[in-house]
Image: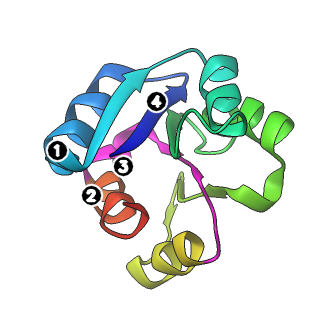
Amino acid sequence: MKKIVVGGQMDKQKIATLAQKIAGDKASVEVKSDVEAAMALKQGKADLYLGACNTGGGGALAMAIAILGMAVCSTVSMPGKIKTEDEIRADAASGKKAFGFTAQDIDRVVPIILKYAL
């Protein structure tokens, strides 16, 4: 079973609830602070990081980028731009494990991220 951690600055519980609904028995989901979530991923205690903020990359991914490095992080949406499903699939296939997005795009991007990251 995979473990998903939810960090970021906005709507953590909404993300966690949606992720658990989609993942079912394929994953467990836990809400953490940004630092705790990124450290869990770094230490191998989690497999996937999801986070939201107003910009999709700042508060959603700042600590993940600082702790994990940009190579495993992806900003999936930002104001006015959402990556395509093909771009998200490519991110997951290339080893990205931390995904940031704007809070208003949670319902659109979380299902796609989980489709390819689980």
Q: How many marks?
A: 4
Mark 1 closeness class: few <14, some 14–19, many ≥20 residues within 10 Å: few
Q: Which three-letter amino acid code belongs to the residue tagged 4?
A: Val
Tell me, yes or no, whether the two marked residues, 1 and 4, touch with CB atoms within 8 Å: no
Above-or-below relation of 117 to 83:
above
Q: Amino acid at mark 2?
A: Pro
Where is residue 105? Give x, y as percent. Answer: 36, 49
Tell me the magenta residue range.
Answer: 94-107
Distance from label 4 to label 2 (Cα)?
14 Å
Rendered image: mark on residue 111: 2
Q: Is residue 104 rendered magenta in the image?
A: yes
Question: Which three-letter amino acid code belongs to the residue tagged 1?
Answer: Asp
Task: Report x, y in % for residue 33.
Answer: 58, 15
Query: Label 3: which residue?
Result: 105
Mark carried by residue 6: 4
CA gap between label 1 and label 4 equals: 17 Å
- Left or right of residue 60, residue 19 in this image: left
